Amino acid sequence: MNAQNQRLPGGGRIDRSHPIEFSFDGRKLAGYRGDTLASALLANGVTLVGRSFKYHRPRGILSAGPEEPNALVTLGSGGRREPNLPATTLELGDGMVVETQNRWPSLAFDVQSLNGLFGPFLSAGFYYKTFMGPTRRAWMFYEHFIRKAAGLGRAGTDPDPARYEVRHAFADVAIIGSGPAGLSAARAAAAAGARVALIEQDFLLGGQLLAERSDGIAAAWLNEVEAELKGLETVTLMKRTSAFGVYDGNVLGLAAQREPLDTRSTGEARQTVTMLRAHSVVFATGAIERPMVFSNNDRPGVMLASAARTYLNRFAVLPGKKIIVAAANDAAWRTAFDLAEAGAEVTVADLRAAPPPALAAEAGRLGVAVRTATRIVDLRGGHAVRRATLSGPGGQSETACDLVCMSGGWSPTVHLTSHLGIKPRYRDDIDGFVPGIFPASWSGAGAMMGAYATADTIEDGHRAGIEAASFCGKSAPVSAPPKLDLGETVTAPLRDVPSAHRGKAFVDFQMDVTTKDIELAHREGYESVEHLKRYTTLGMGTDQGKTSNFAALAAMAGLRGATVPETGTTTFRPPFTPVAIGALAGRATGHHFKPFRRTPMHDWHQANGADMLEVGLWMRPWFYRQSGADVNEAYVAEMRTVRQAAGLMDISTLGKIDVQGPDAAIFLDRVYANGFAKLPVGRARYGVMLRDDGIVFDDGTTTRLAESRFFMTTSTAKAADVLSRLEFLLDTAWPDLRVAVTSVSDEWAAMSIAGPQSRAILAAEFPSLDVSDAALPHMGLLEGEWEGRALRILRLSYSGERAYELYVGATAGAQLWNRLLEAGDPFGLKPYGVEALGALRVEKGHVAGPEIDGRTTLDDLGLGRIAGKRSGFVGDVLRRRPALLAPARERLVGLECIEDGKRLRGGAILFLPGEKAHGHGRGRVTSVTFSPERGHYVGLALLAGDMAAEGNEVVAVYPMKAETVRARIVAPVFLDPQGERLHG
Amino acid sequence: MLRIECPCCGPRDHDEFRYGGDASVTRPAHDDPDPEAWYAYVYVRKNPAGLHREFWQHVIGCRQWLVVERDTRNHVISSVAFARTSQA
Ligand SMILES: [Zn+2]
């Protein structure tokens, strides 16, 4: 095992009593609890951790936080494999298996880095031009190679066995970020009386304070405030939780990681997404340090200055021995001082000609060499930086080094505040963007608002916490926060002006965008920020360009001779940090992807060989194995049973609506295209509803139970829409009508018994009920009791046979179903499924969902007669628009297959005989079935009215199976056109 | 996520609601035979950048149809009321 050679003997926020072993590309390494993967790698002297996206350049660790563009790794294996995780936020866990990405055959020797090969393809605009321009065809050819060469980690292909959760939570005040500003805000808001959720992506609270010495005054302050917050029941500390999105209504999307323990053994969720609804939000998201842009600035061993300080003070890792700190402001000097104190040989190269004398004095005391008005212009070294070329007043010189720390200033982390469209605002004094104007329920605090000195951020957080609590009506008196003055001096950075570079000077490390790419975009006219972004792919990586955005803006501003605010800023969208799809799904996967609705007879179907079919959310019997070996055999057999004896069908899925009130008949008269006012009590009627635009909405049967009470059924699919529509009309259009509508869909089990033996079976099962044709004629209603439960029998037919619908209380559904099958057994009664149901109605020529498809009118469907001369119903006026009456409109016809051994298929396109089968054709087949009555396939179709004359031939083309079949147009009724079997 | 303060049930996520379109248009009387009136009601919309009166139904809740005033520019909801103003 590799010793942790770079680890200092003491200090840091790591638990040295708890060593952790992990595997990195097969190498066994060790770290401590409290390490991130990045800090453990650095402790082991590992600086090369990845290859870049396009050029396969060696990359190291740039940052110590979620902004990391380079050090992306793949964690785990098999279904648990997760790619593109920043090593800088990955909490080290026992037995972690980590692989580097985007290298072949190995990280140290990567074939594609010999990449003069691919360079020309991959310059700026490559993707843009390839996808949008005349070279699109070439993409087809090159894609295969490019995809292999360019990319990040690969996702696993096995199902992920880990558990994920989605939960919902509420708070008065949500505070995002637990640096000094967030902690101070949490303390104040809680003291004021608010319920507080403090959200921190790290596994420790403290934010930038964690970069301070672990035994100093910053640590003391942090301990004091953290202890205070932990003691409060009204404060929820949400560590390891990344706020990835801010949504309307102050809803925050939060993704929480488990502690790195093996969730396989505990069964706990690996990640949890929380949708947090807060009355007010405090953004204390801090700031991200900007890299500097110079030649070969992407070499392993180049690090943000604040990150180096974090590795030193938090993780007790000295990441270099001979260090150059490239500064443009005062903050980077503190890194130089701490590194020098830890024993490194440090040179500060400050862009500024005259840094504050106090800093120079301290540098002198610590033996830190200082070069002013000096910048780094180039680096040498492949897998690790070896020498730096510095350019200053005395010309250029080379200096040996093993670590370069850089600080081009700070960019407030405004991403989350931009998610709802609030444009960031440029501030001259800090040369950076801060958020625009907030809504009243939001506050910002600390570095994200441009306040960089710790003492100021604490004050700012305190104010924001009080403000946020007060917005929630909580304003108990709050004591002043403990003071912490780290003595930082804050100055605006001197902006680094990128100029001609010897080698590649990277702006966006993850997407491999260089200054040359930005120059090219400018030359080709892609000057607006949004164009620049799409043209160069800048900021489009998994890091959303957190470290690159400002440098790109500055570069473009320089090229255009404009200011940064004139150049603009891009729009930030969720997620701030990547979220695993599994976490968003939570438990809603596989069987739980959506709810299943089961009828009261579901268990019987399952136990008796039904193949089930998903119909919307419902599970319905498709066909029964007892009827045939496959669906085609079974449905024909089930049709024969219905036509020759009797069949029993579960129709509990129908929508059922109770319509009551003195004006119920008037109401139904308006919502149906056909009249209901004159329907006698005890009788049912088929009805069709239109939409306001005159298109058919739904059909069903409504029965008059009493003078002012009706029982409506709707199609299975439209049950919810119909109820909502009826409620809409009553609430908004006709509030004067005294009517109430109530869904009773789940209260009634329903079954249909159809076939010539059906009456005999009912007579056998219900000896006390008179089911004679006189007592229960076609479209009649019989109400009674069965086993002490309400029972309704409606004599309705969908199949064309004598048939009855039976409605009984849902809990008695299975019992009645069983009893009917027993009673019907001597008569040949058998269950049938939806395939046979659909086939029977096609044979009878009834329209259903495939014909009532949201585009057809009553006339299209041959139902114009039911409206007759009526008016005043929904859709009446617009159904008579000229376009809907055009003779060439597609209308319903019947089709008969006239080629032996061939079949019709739903969805086939209709053409004239001899016509080229191209385009949308003259119409389409909507529903088909094999007709045992006719001995061949029959179907319903929508066909252009001017060619729909009965007797004509058409050709039905089904390109998916390369089938062409001839068919004859017939009337859309294939069985018993006189309707005699209804009474048979 | 919009949060709609149902006058019956309190503040709820928009997942519980069904959107019902523009509430500023006037529905013609059920027996109004004028095609222009129906055309305007069904098809003509102002689509404002700003305050928009719209119908929402609290389907997973009290099932009341509501009139919500929402600013289309920032989704801020300024009022919610029952759509049914006159009771029969
Ligand atoms: Zn409600």
Image: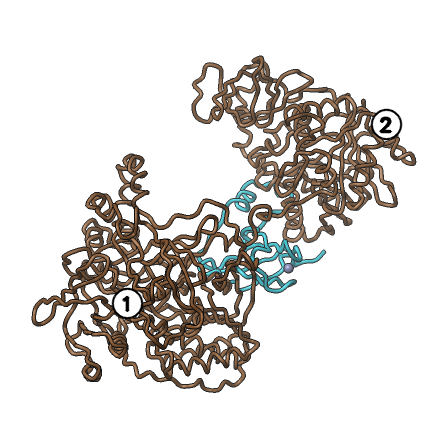
Residue identifier under label 2:
A760
Chain A, which colour? brown
A426, above or below A830, in the image: below
Q: Residue at left 74%, top 52%?
A: A738
**Picture quarter containing residue A937?**
top right
Compared across the picture, whether A879 is left or right of A487 comes to right
A109, above or below A612, in the image: below
A135, above or below A984, in the image: below
Q: Disc 1 or disc 2, which is closer to the eye?
A: 1
Residue B37 % position (x, y): 55, 44
**Picture quarter containing residue A657?**
top right
Residue A905 % position (x, y): 56, 24
- Front position in the image: A477 or B70: A477
Ligand 1, seen in the image, is in the quarter at: bottom right
Q: Secondary structure at mark 2?
A: helix
Give the Cα separation between the discs numbered 1 and 2: 88 Å
Chain B, which colour? cyan
Are callouts 1 and 2 both on one chain? yes
Compared across the picture, whether A192 is left or right of A423 comes to right
Of all chains, the one bearing label 1 is A
Can the viewer see residue A765 in this picture? Answer: yes
Residue A578 % position (x, y): 42, 57
Compared across the picture, whether A67 is left or right of A933 comes to left
Q: Earlier in the sequence, mark 1 or mark 2?
A: 1
- Front position in the image: A721 or A214: A214
Residue identifier under label 1:
A304
A194, above or below A398, in the image: below
Of all chains, the one bearing label 2 is A
| Residue type beneath disc 2 | Ala
| Residue type beneath disc 1 | Leu
